[in-house]
């Protein structure tokens, strides 16, 4: 009798725990309903639901003759030559950034003494990993000492990140160059990858920011939101300094401190921020619905030369164009002012964005720029042909990639159509949002 009673209690405890978990997940779902965000200022909440098929760490073996499909592939092709044991170690890396030796081949040129490591945070849990390639200082690749190869495994269309960087660039934001590439490893096709330019000295030079101090809002933190953290140690815990590392965090500390205490915010922004460029950044963020940048996934650059002003640089743009936090890709109604105090993302909000858009004249300039971009730039006439060309370019490699790294993405044409649908829906939603914010009642 005692044994039965204890077993019953254990089962009841498990059932109760499952019920609490299910209720918690239900309560944390995204905001639903037909009311536009301009009239429903509610925190956007999310859950992270990850469904990953079980696969070998090196992907599935391809049937004989499969790689012949890639003969007509017109994508740039890179090759890594690396010991299989080292590649296995890279693929097992969960949080550490241990590097392993390799060589890298591009355009017939071999780069020796290369190092490779895993990159990303959540993407390290995927079967198909993302990589950072580090080049010998004496033999940079296209002027850069690092190269990012993102797996794109989560994106059924593969191209969201590439298109997002292009949108930021088209809006007038200093953004990394991104393109789709084919990656071979030790002579065999390994996958279709997203190449993303590393924000570094060469990037800064190309964007007329040579000599700037560059800070990265790191993904491991939820406090890289330009808060006034007061002391250098706190800033070093949530930002990494990418250039002029010996100069410390003084400029960033001063900027965030003055941002929090400015009694005349308009004058502060005019003096300290590239205002028009930041408006372009906010606009591109809204257009692409980049919800993953509020308190991480961006860079801050301080040009201490002639301008002595700050700008914001986008980073890690894979969670865009309808990417939903529950493994869906049909969300196009996140608020225009997402990331501000009144429209937080999962409880988080960015202090720079909030203070900037709290200024009526600056918010008006932002709305005007949004209207202009929706009329001239973020249109189906411009971006549908881009998507059609990308679909044509990546088609053969995408098909073979899905054979090696299966996911729940479905066929490529349907996935590309989903990106197009997002553009249509997002445009319509943002036009309603702009009209609502301009109404006398708001």
Image (spheres, rainbow, N blue to C red):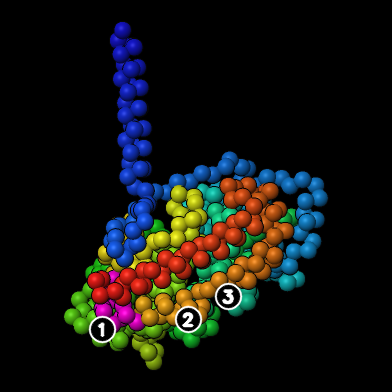
- Quarter of the image for the C terminus: give it: bottom left
Q: Which residues are magenta?
A: 352-365
* Residue located beneath label 1 in the image: 266
Relative to 217, residue 330 above or below? above
Q: Disc 1 and disc 2: Cα gap in Å?
A: 22 Å
Label annotation for residue 382? 3
Q: Is residue 376 magenta?
A: no
Neighbourhood count class around disc 3 (C-alpha, 10 Å): few under 14, some 14–19, many 20 upward? few
- Name the outermost residue toward the top: 1
Which residue is painted at 44% across and 80% down in the image?
A: 372
Which one is nearer the viewer's eye here, 385 or 65? 385
Q: Disc 3 and disc 2: Cα gap in Å?
A: 16 Å
User: In which quarter of the view is residue 132 placed?
Assistant: bottom right
Question: Circle 3 sits in a helix, a strand or a loop, which is it?
Answer: helix
Question: Circle 1 sits in a helix, a strand or a loop, which is it?
Answer: helix
User: In which quarter of the view is residue 133 placed?
Assistant: bottom right
- Quarter of the image for the N terminus: give it: top left
Q: Position of residue 180 (x, y in %)?
A: 63, 66
Mark found first going from the N terminus, 3 or 2:
2
Q: Position of residue 5 (x, y in %)?
A: 30, 13
* Residue located beneath label 2 in the image: 172
Which one is nearer the viewer's eye here, 166 or 174? 166
Q: Disc 1 and disc 3: Cα gap in Å?
A: 35 Å
Question: Circle 2 sits in a helix, a strand or a loop, which is it?
Answer: loop
The answer, for residue 203, to whether it is visible in the render is yes
Which residue is painted at 45% across and 49% down in the image?
A: 326
Q: Position of residue 134 (x, y in %)?
A: 58, 66
Which residue is painted at 71% across and 45% down in the image?
A: 61
Of tags 3 and 2, the one toward the viewer is: 3
Mark found first going from the N terminus, 1 or 3:
1
The answer, for residue 130, to whether it is visible in the render is no
Q: Position of residue 219 (x, y in %)?
A: 41, 60
């Amino acid at each position: 009798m005692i044994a039965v009673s204890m077993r019953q209690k254990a089962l009841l405890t498990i059932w109760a725990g499952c019920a609490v978990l299910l209720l918690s997940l239900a309560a944390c779902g995204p905001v639903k309903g037909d009311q536009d965000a301009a009239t429903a200022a509610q925190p956007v909440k999310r859950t992270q639901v990850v469904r990953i098929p079980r696969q070998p760490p090196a992907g599935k073996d391809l049937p004989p003759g499969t790689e012949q499909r890639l003969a007509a592939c017109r994508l740039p092709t890179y090759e890594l030559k690396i010991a299989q044991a080292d590649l296995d170690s890279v693929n097992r890396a969960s949080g550490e950034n241990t590097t392993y030796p390799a060589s890298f081949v591009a355009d017939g040129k071999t780069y020796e003494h290369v190092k490779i490591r895993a990159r990303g945070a959540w993407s390290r849990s995927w079967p198909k990993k993302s990589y950072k390639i580090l080049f010998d200082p004496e033999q940079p690749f296209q002027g850069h000492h690092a190269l990012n190869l993102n797996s794109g495994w989560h994106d059924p269309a593969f191209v969201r990140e590439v298109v997002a960087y292009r949108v930021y660039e088209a809006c007038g934001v200093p953004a990394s160059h991104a393109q789709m590439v084919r990656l071979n490893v030790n002579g065999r096709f390994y996958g279709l990858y997203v190449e993303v330019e590393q924000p570094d000295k060469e990037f800064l030079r190309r964007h007329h920011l040579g000599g700037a101090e560059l800070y990265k809002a790191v993904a491991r933190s939820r406090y890289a939101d330009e808060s006034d953290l007061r002391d250098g140690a706190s800033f070093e815990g949530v930002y990494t300094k990418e250039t002029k590392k010996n100069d410390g965090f003084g400029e960033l500390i001063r900027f965030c401190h003055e941002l929090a205490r400015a009694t005349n915010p308009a004058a502060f922004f005019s003096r300290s921020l590239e205002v028009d460029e930041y408006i372009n950044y906010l606009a591109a963020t809204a257009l692409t619905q980049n919800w993953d940048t509020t308190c991480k996934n961006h860079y801050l650059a301080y040009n201490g030369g002639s301008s002595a002003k700050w700008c914001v640089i986008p980073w890690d743009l894979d969670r865009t164009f309808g990417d939903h936090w529950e493994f869906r890709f049909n969300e196009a109604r996140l608020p225009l002012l997402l990331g501000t105090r009144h429209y937080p993302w999962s409880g988080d909000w960015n202090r720079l964005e909030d203070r900037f858009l709290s200024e009526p004249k600056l918010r008006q300039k932002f709305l005007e720029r949004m209207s202009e971009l929706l009329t001239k730039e973020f249109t189906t006439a411009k971006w549908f042909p881009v998507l059609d060309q990308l679909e044509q370019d990546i088609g053969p490699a995408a098909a073979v990639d899905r054979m090696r790294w299966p996911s729940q993405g479905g066929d490529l044409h349907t996935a590309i159509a989903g990106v197009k649908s997002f553009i249509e829906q997002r445009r319509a939603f943002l036009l309603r949002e702009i009209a609502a914010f301009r109404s006398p009642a708001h």
